[in-house]
Image (cartoon, helix red, strand yellow):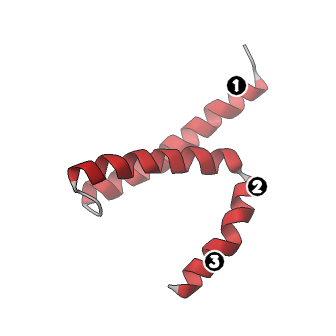
């Protein structure tokens, strides 16, 4: 556990600096899922885990849309 904490402390800022859009979007989606499941008291259920996987996908999709908007402003 200590190793994962140290790994997160060291790698986290590097990951944010390299790919801030992905970090922001993915963590926003994960927070929405966590909030929804906290209200239902279903944290760590199979549905919660499934929804977290979907949040990662939503973060990736949002990142692609964001990059496309920056490259092709309308």
Task: Single out the mark in the foreground, 3 or 1.
Answer: 3
CB within 8 Å, label 2 to label 3: no
C-alpha span from label 1 to label 2: 19 Å
Among the two numbered marks 2 and 3 on one chain, the one whose residue lies closer to the N terminus? 3
Circle 3 Cα neighbour tier, 10 Å, few/some/many (<14 / 14–19 / ≥20): few
* Position of residue 50 measured from the top left corner of the image (x, y, whole percent): 34, 53
* Position of residue 2 measured from the top left corner of the image (x, y, whole percent): 55, 86
Tell me: 25 left or right of 30.
Answer: right
Q: Is mark 1 on a helix, strand or loop?
A: helix
Q: Is residue 11 above or below residue 69?
A: below
Residue at image point 22% right, 56% down:
41
**Residue labelled with disc 1:** 69
* Position of residue 32 measured from the top left corner of the image (x, y, whole percent): 41, 45
Q: What element carries label 3?
A: helix
Circle 1 Cα neighbour tier, 10 Å, few/some/many (<14 / 14–19 / ≥20): few
Tell me the quarter of the picture where residue 67 sits. Answer: top right
Q: Is residue 24 above or below residue 2?
A: above
Residue at image point 44% right, 49% down:
31
Of all residues, the one furthest to the top in this rendering is 74
Q: Which mark is residue 18?
A: 2
CB within 8 Å, label 3 to label 1: no
C-alpha span from label 3 to label 1: 33 Å
**Residue labelled with disc 3:** 7
Among the two numbered marks 3 and 1 on one chain, the one whose residue lies closer to the N terminus? 3
Among the two numbered marks 1 and 2 on one chain, the one whose residue lies closer to the N terminus? 2
Q: Is residue 53 above or below residue 9?
A: above
Residue at image point 61% right, 47% down:
24
Counting the numbered discs, the total is 3
Q: What element carries label 2?
A: helix
């Amino acid at each position: 556990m200590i190793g994962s904490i140290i790994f997160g402390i060291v790698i986290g800022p590097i990951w944010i600096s390299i790919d801030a859009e992905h970090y922001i979007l993915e963590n926003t989606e994960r927070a929405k899922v966590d909030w929804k499941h906290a209200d239902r008291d279903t944290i760590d259920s199979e549905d919660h885990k499934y929804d977290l996987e979907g949040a990662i996908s939503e973060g990736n999709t949002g990142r692609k849309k964001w990059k496309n908007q920056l490259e092709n402003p309308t």
